[in-house]
Amino acid sequence: MAVDDRLPAYLEVSGLIRAVDAAGGFATVVSKGERTAGTLMVVCCDRATPARAYERMPQLDSSRKWVLSKTQDTENPKEFTDWCNRRGKQDDDLWIVELDIVNAERFIDADPFIS
C-alpha cells in the first residue's frame, strides 16, 4: 500500500488563503469538498486578466501537476462561472478556492497564464 504524502485538503486550503491574504490579496472558499482527501481547483483572478481555473492532475511519473483547465472568455464571462459550478457538482470531493491577486499562479507553483 502506497503512503499518500498529500496534505489534508482543509490544511492546504487554509495555508493558501493565509498566504494570499499575507501578500495583500483576497482568497475565499467558493465550494468545500471532502475535508481530508478532497481535491482542489484554484480559480486565479485579478482585474487585469481573465479568470483561470487550475486543477492538479496526475502525471505519468506519479507526480501531480497544476494544469490550466479553463480560461474565462471575456466575451462570455458567465460561461466560466457556469463551468465552475458544473465542475463542482460533478465531484463532491472538490474544493473550489478563488485567489484574487496579481499573478495568483505563484501560490500554486503553476506557470502564469499567458494571453
Image (spheres, grey):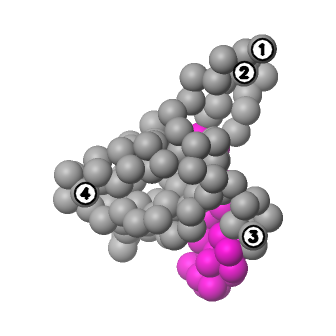
Would you name the residue on which mark 2 appears? 62
Q: Amino acid at mark 3?
A: Lys
Drawn side of residue 107 relative to residue 66, left or right: left
Residue 16 vs residue 33, the one in the foreground: 33
Q: Position of residue 14 (x, y in %)?
A: 38, 50
Please tell me whether mark 3 sits on a helix, a strand or a loop. Answer: helix
Gap between marks 2 and 4 measured at Cα: 31 Å
Would you name the residue on which mark 4 appears? 21
Please tell me whether mark 4 sits on a helix, a strand or a loop. Answer: helix
Q: From what the image shows, is residue 75 above or below residue 65?
A: below
Would you name the residue on which mark 1 appears? 1
Q: Amino acid at mark 2?
A: Ser
Assess disc 1: are there few (<14), some (14-19) or many (≥20) residues with their C-alpha within 10 Å of its C-alpha: few
Magenta-colored stretch includes residue 79:
yes
Would you name the residue on which mark 3 appears? 89
Q: Quadrant of residue 96?
A: bottom right
> Magenta part of the protein: which range?
66-85
Q: Amino acid at mark 1?
A: Met
Gap between marks 1 and 4 measured at Cα: 38 Å
Which residue shows up at 68% across the image and 74% down it? 85
Which residue shows up at 66% across the image and 70% down it? 84
Dot 1 or dot 4, earlier in sequence: 1
Assess disc 2: are there few (<14), some (14-19) or many (≥20) residues with their C-alpha within 10 Å of its C-alpha: few
Magenta-colored stretch includes residue 42:
no
Select label 1 or label 4 by which is in front: 1
